[in-house]
Structure formats: structure tokens, C-alpha cells
Image (cartoon, helix red, strand yellow):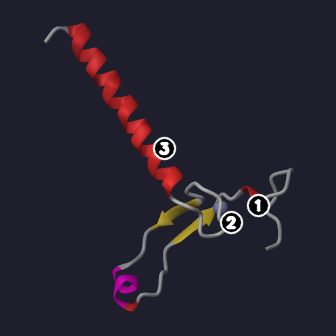
Amino acid sequence: MNKDQRDSNRRNARQLETIVHNAEMARHRCENCGEPGGHWISTRGSSLEALITGIDDQEGFWTCQKLYGEDGRRLVA
Ligand SMILES: [Zn+2]
């Protein structure tokens, strides 16, 4: 395989990754605002205890448009 072909393959792979990622994000509906897209940014995943007890203890924050005002400040829910 020559260099051009390898570069082209790499580009295609990246494009496919983006398409797959976007499709997954679009399929996911936000459980907070109901809009399509993944609005939950997880900063710490669920612990093993959470998996056992079923109580989700993951930490993170929402990026929903509805939770933030035009000045970027968080609205009171
Ligand atoms: Zn949302």
C-alpha cells in the first residue's frame, strides 16, 4: 500500500468514527430535558457499589441548554 492510500484510509477511519459518534449521540435522548443528545458529562463513573445496590452515584454535570441562561449562568431548577 502506498502512502497516499494509507493517508486516505486513515481519513476514512476518522470520518467513520465521527459519523458513528454522532449517530450514537443523536440516538441518546437526554433524560433531563428530553432533547436528543448526550447532555450528561460524567466526571466520575458509577462505583461497583452502585452497580450492586442500583443506586447511581456517578458524578458529573448537565450541559442542557434549558438549565443555563443566555449569560451562561445556571438557572435554578
Ligand atoms: Zn438535556
Q: Mark 1 vs ligand 1: CB under 8 Å?
A: yes
Quadrant of residue 37 within the rendered picture: bottom right
Given the image, on which type of amino acid does mark 3 rest? Asn
Q: Are marks 1 and 2 in contact (CB under 8 Å)?
A: yes
As measured in the structure, the alpha-carbon distance from the residue carrying label 3 to the one carrying label 1 is 21 Å
Q: Is residue 51 magenta?
A: yes
Q: Which mark is residue 66?
A: 1
Position of residue 33 relative to residue 52, above or below, is above
Residue in the image at 48% along x and 43% along y: 22
* Quadrant containing ligand 1: bottom right
Given the image, on which type of amino acid does mark 2 rest? Cys
- Per the image, label 2 sits on a secondary structure element best described as loop
**Which residue is labeled 2 in the image?**
33
- Per the image, label 3 sits on a secondary structure element best described as helix
Q: Which mark is residue 22?
A: 3
Residue in the image at 26% along x and 8% along y: 4
- The segment highlighted magenta reads 48-52
